[in-house]
Amino acid sequence: MHGIIHAELKKYVDAKYGPEAWKAILKEARLENTVYLPIQTYDDADAVAIVTAASKQTHISAEVLLEDFGEFIAPDLINMYRSMIKPEWKAMELLLHTEETIHRVVRTQNPGAKPPRLRFEQTGPNQLKLYYSSERKMSAVAKGIINGVAKHYGQAVTIRERKNADGSSEMAITIS
């Protein structure tokens, strides 16, 4: 997993639970001597261990934490990739173009990075269907990012998700 995610996880934990919580979570995850750099790639198991430890420390399910984390990082991601986002876009357009703009650049610039495969299709004037696929099986992060993107544009969003046995999922998204 790309180090930017670890850096954002630390930022999230610091903001939500305080800097001491990050140290306790790393200790619980048996990663207390690890420093995560945004420009490096790390084993996915580290992120899983961190989320598992955070869930244990906070008594909040990993799914809820991941969705909240996704919403938390959305503004930073929008800012980071601002040059690829057209000014006239709103939430729907940004989501529809995520794979061919942002994820394409991430994969090109960071050969070790493996963002999830997102296939959006517009099913109505304010409706999308998302086909999420990733070996990490963290669709909750995608749901959170979608919520954060909608919030960024001052729009409301509803998401209905159907998870598949292989860890992929399909989401029906309505943006208003």
Image (tube, rainbow, N blue to C red):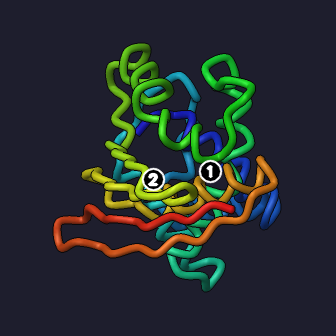
Q: Secondary structure at mark 2?
A: helix
Q: Residue at x 65, y 44 (%)?
A: 8
Q: Is residue 78 above or below residue 59?
A: above
Residue lying farthest to the front in this orientation: 125
**What residue appears at the point 65 percent right and 79 percent down from the top-left corner?**
58
Instruction: Residue at 62%, 50% (x, y): give it.
Output: 9
Identify the secondary structure beneath mark 1.
Answer: helix
Q: Residue 30, image x and y in percent?
A: 47, 59
Label 2: few (<14), some (14–19) or many (≥20) C-alpha neighbours in 10 Å? some
Three-letter amino acid code of the residue under disc 1: Leu
Q: Which of the marked residues, 2 or 1, is nearer the chain's N terminus?
A: 1
Q: Please give left or right for residue 154 compared with residue 92 in the image.
A: right
On screen, residue 112 versus residue 29, left or right, reads: left
Asked if the residue at tag 1 contacts the one at tag 2, i.e. Cβ–Cβ closer than 8 Å, the answer is yes
Instruction: Indicate the amino acid at tag 2.
Output: Ala
* Residue 132 tag number: none
Q: Residue at x 60, y 82 (%)?
A: 60
Tell me the CA gap for discs 2 and 1: 9 Å
Residue 47 numbered tag? 2
Q: Local crowd at mark 1 within 10 Å, few (<14), some, or many (≥20)?
A: many
Q: Is residue 56 above or below residue 120?
A: below
Give whichever of 126, 3 is nearer the camera. Answer: 126
